[in-house]
Amino acid sequence: MRLIFAGTPEFAACALAALHGAGHEIVLVLTQPDRPAGRGLKLAPSAVKVLAQERGFEVYQPSALKDAEAQQRLRAPGADAMVVAAYGLILPEPVLAIARLGAINIHASLLPRWRGAAPIQRAILAGDARTGISIMQMDRGLDTGPVLAAESMPIAADDSSASLQHKLAELGARLIVSALARLERGQLHPEPQADAGASYAAKITKAEAGIDWREAAPAIERKVRAFDPFPGARTMIRNVGLKIWRTQVTAAEGVPGTILATGPEGIVVACGAGALSVQELQRAGGKRLGAGQFLAGFPLAAGERLEFSAKAAI
């Protein structure tokens, strides 16, 4: 088929590569405008743009799709379908109808659970046992369209958002190729979503990143995994901001936030219920380090307290 593809991060780039590999003609690629990145804040292209340029696809980076000129740009190629994956811009209703088969979204959850911008992180935070990919016919609502195909997978006990996104990207790439083939043959039947069980996956913000050590250890452990790689679960000690990257629930008790023990295997911190062994962390201006390496350069002692701060700067 002749496809317009709209996406921005690596999750979307995986699907774009699979669609091209399956023989589809990519007539136009939409991705968000280049953004400042890195310490130098130089403009950097999205993962989708990098791949599109490598493959010789035409790239279009509008800041919005509301105006007639932008919509004409999409209409011109005469696409059979528009495939959307983590694009990051709202598609106005006229855009949804530009392609012959409409706009088809690769969504990283089992709809109607976790509609919205951050389904991967929210699933980990909530302690969900499973997640998956839904291939959805887009409508004017927020991830409310009928589901064309879906496949579930388990969330591993050690999955971070980074590792789970990689797994879901591969699943999404495989499922969209299969779904498009069946859609063209008339073998897919859209299933309307039920409102019962619907939940909203709000965008992750830095304001949520602070660790409240009064929470139970399993909840904090999920937060650490959900916020890896962004924005990183945060705490403070001695007015120094820390990011916590890897932890393990352990059997110990104490005043929440208190360091109970330190060693090369981990820094044991008391929580509201149970404790966490912090195994990988990072101080402001530093690198991600294992507990042993971190303690060699920033010694901590039992009895010190980690503090809550949503603004801990790293």
Image (cartoon, rainbow, N blue to C red):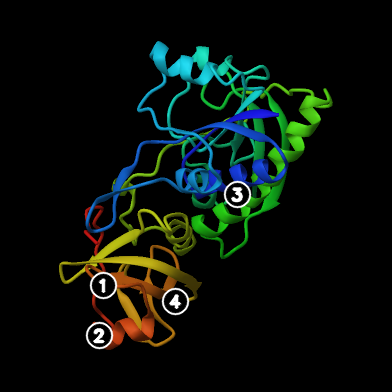
> Sequence-wise, which precedes: disc 3 or disc 1?
3
Q: Residue at 42% x, 55% y: name it.
A: 227
SS class, disc 3: helix
> Sequence-wise, which precedes: disc 3 or disc 2?
3
Residue indicated by mark 4: 252
Distance between the Cα atoms at labels 1 and 4? Answer: 29 Å
> Sequence-wise, which precedes: disc 3 or disc 4?
3
Residue indicated by mark 3: 169
> Sequence-wise, which precedes: disc 1 or disc 2?
1
Mark 1 surroundings: few (<14), some (14-19) or many (≥20) residues within 10 A:
few
Report the number of discs.
4
In this view of the protein, which residue sits in the foreground, 226 or 126? 226
Position of residue 269 in the picture relative to residue 176 (left or right):
left
In this view of the protein, which residue sits in the foreground, 1 or 245? 1
Q: Is residue 141 above or below residue 133?
A: above
In this rendering, does residue 140 appear at all?
no
The label on residue 297 is 2
Q: Position of residue 21 (x, y in %)?
A: 69, 46
Q: Residue at 64% x, 24% y: name it.
A: 81
